[in-house]
Structures are given as structure tokens and as C-alpha cells.
Image: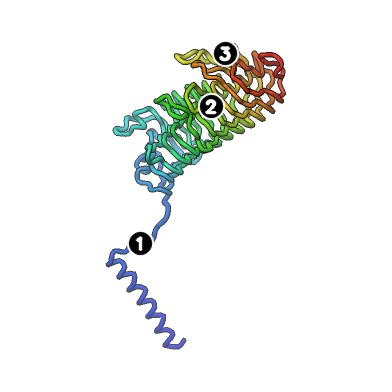
Amino acid sequence: MDIRQNMTKRQITYLACTAVAVASVLGAAPPDAGPTTHLVRPGESVQQAVDAAKPGDTVLLSVGTYRESVRVTTSRLTLRGMGPGTVLTPGPAQAGNTCAQAGNGICVEGTDGSPVEGTTIGLLTLSGFAQNGLWATRTDRLTVQMVTAEENGQSGIAQERSVRSVFQDNTARNNGDAGLFVSNTTDTEAGATDTQGTVIERNRLQDNRIGVTVKRLRNLTIENNTMTANCAALFIVGDESRPRAGALTVRGNFVHRNNKFCPKTERLPFIQGSGIVLTGAEDTLVTGNHVTENAGTSPFSGGIVLYKSFVGALSERNVISGNLVRHNAPGDLINGDTGQGNNLQGNICGASQPAGLC
């Protein structure tokens, strides 16, 4: 090799090293290391890992049981386990943890001016919490995927004041109220809010009081879910507030034998044998659903039911078409509402109230 070429390489190496040293002395920032994965093992604190994580990071929980509640306030954070064997369950008192104090498992909480954006919760089990397995408020583009929420006192998965959420491939069973609950607000009376396209799809809702409750919302899709062995499969709830609940799509769901008995509450009579119930909703499309063998004697019992809300709000301009609705009692299609413009035609069904809808 020519000595001049060899000297040139040495000079280049020297200059590069000198540049790094100078940058260090001058305090130049190191290159961005990118997102970090924080691995947590049983016995370690999930909350500490979440608090240390930055937007874009992942907190990964190994298989095992974690006896704590976790509060998430970081956008673009992924909190996930390694499947159903990663379990969060109530533990000792956690001073200062408002999620634990409220009786919830995981809380994703933003503020009115600064929602939690783009955060994902997935691949874990939330079991035995006094209130909700997962509670979310003031979020944007929250994704909850492949979560099992079971035996929680209130809802398996619950959300309010949020937009553009995706609830996908979850299992909610044996929860005290709804398997999955979405609402405009839970602490005030207000008109329906626009979810800007929230999607509830491919979830399994089983043995809850109500499989899915949608309360005072607009612009939301509920599709390809399986709802069975609940007292009621799906409640879409509106009231006299403005804007009205509605502009929803309920499509391709399998609703079978939701015949569990649930006693009356302060707000509602007993529930049993209810498939899809619309009360006080407008401009909703219910199509392509299989609704079979839901039977009971509750005011809400039947396959697909339109029911005037208890505050007198009517269901109006809803389209119930293209559904297979068979072997439900007291009827496959029940229009117990006096609202105008409801269209119940083109369904495969055997009996209706009033007669002539099938």
C-alpha cells in the first residue's frame, strides 16, 4: 500500500476522534436512541416502569401476576403483556394512586386540554377490581386489543370523553355491569358527543349484565362481535338531551341466548333475554346481525327491540334491515316505540310486535 494512502486514513481517523471529543466537551446531545422497551417481571412495579416511559416507549409485562393498579397519562405509550397469563389484580393500598383508590385496574387518563393520544393497552388480563378492569377518560386514538377483563365489579372495559378509539379482539366476561361500556360522560347529563369513528369489533362479551352499553354517543361502529349469556347483549341508550344519541352502525354481530337474569336497579327494571335494544336513539343502522334464542319477560326482552326511554325520548329514523332474527321471545322484532320514521323491513324473522314486521 502507498505510504501516502496509509497516512491519509490515519489522518481521517484522528480527525473523526477529535470531532467526537470536541462535541463531548461542548455538550452536544448524543444521537436519539429511539423508543425503549421497559421489561417488567412479577414482583417488580408496573407503575414505576410506566412513570419512567416516554412517548413511543413500550412497557412489556412478563407472564405472571401483578397485584397493583396502573395509571397511564403518557401519549403514544404501549402497555402490553404476553397474553392472558399476564394478570393484573388488586393488591395492597397504593398511596397517591388515584386509579387504585377508585377501584380500577388500568386507568388511561388525559385532561380536557391535553388528551392522552395514541396509547395502546393489550395482551393481558384485568381481573377482580372493585370497579372497572380498564377505565379511560379524555383519550384520542386509544387502542385496547386482546385484553381479557373478567370478574370486575362494574365494567370490564369502560371509557368516556374520548374519540377515535379502537376496541378490538377483547374478551369481557362475568363483570358486574357492562362487558364494554362507552359513554359521552359518566358524571354529568349532556348531549351525545361525536366519537369521530370509534370502532368496537371482534370482541367476545359473555356472562355480563350487558354485553356492550353505548350511552349518549354518535358516529360509532359496533361490528362482528359475539355476545352470549348476558342479560342483554347490546344497549344503545339516548335521552332527551341534544344532540341525540345515534348515527351509529351495528353490523354483523352474533347475538345468541342472552338469557341470564339480572334483577332491577334504581334506574331499570329487571333484564333478561334481550338481544339488541335501542332506546332514545336516532338514525342508526342495524344490519347483517344474527340474533337468535334471546327470551324473557322483561320490557326489553326480544331479538331486536325499539323501546322508548324512561325519560320519554323517542327512537326515530332507525333502519333495522337485513338481519337474521329467529326464535326470540316474546318476539323477534319489537317496536314498542312511538317514534317516527323507523324502518323495520327486509329481515328474516318469525314473529313481531306489532304483527306484520316480519
Q: Secondary structure at mark 2?
A: strand
**Residue 133: percent from left, percent from top:** 44, 30
Per the model, the C-alpha gap separating discs 1 and 3 is: 67 Å
State the residue in front, 342 or 37: 342
- Residue at label 1? 30
Per the model, the C-alpha gap separating discs 2 and 1 is: 49 Å
Q: Residues within 10 Å of mark 3 (few under 14, many from 20)?
A: some
Q: Residues within 10 Å of mark 1 (few under 14, many from 20)?
A: few
Q: Secondary structure at mark 1?
A: loop
First along the sequence among labels 1 and 3: 1
Residue 229 visible here: no
Tag 1: residue type?
Answer: Pro
Per the model, the C-alpha gap separating discs 2 and 3 is: 18 Å
- Residue at label 2? 212
**Residue 29: percent from left, percent from top:** 33, 61
**Residue 237: percent from left, percent from top:** 52, 23
Q: Is residue 201 left or right of residue 88?
A: right
- Residue at label 3? 299
Q: Residue furthest top?
A: 297
Tag 2: residue type?
Answer: Val
Tag 3: residue type?
Answer: Pro
Work out whether 255 lies above or below 4: above
First along the sequence among labels 2 and 1: 1
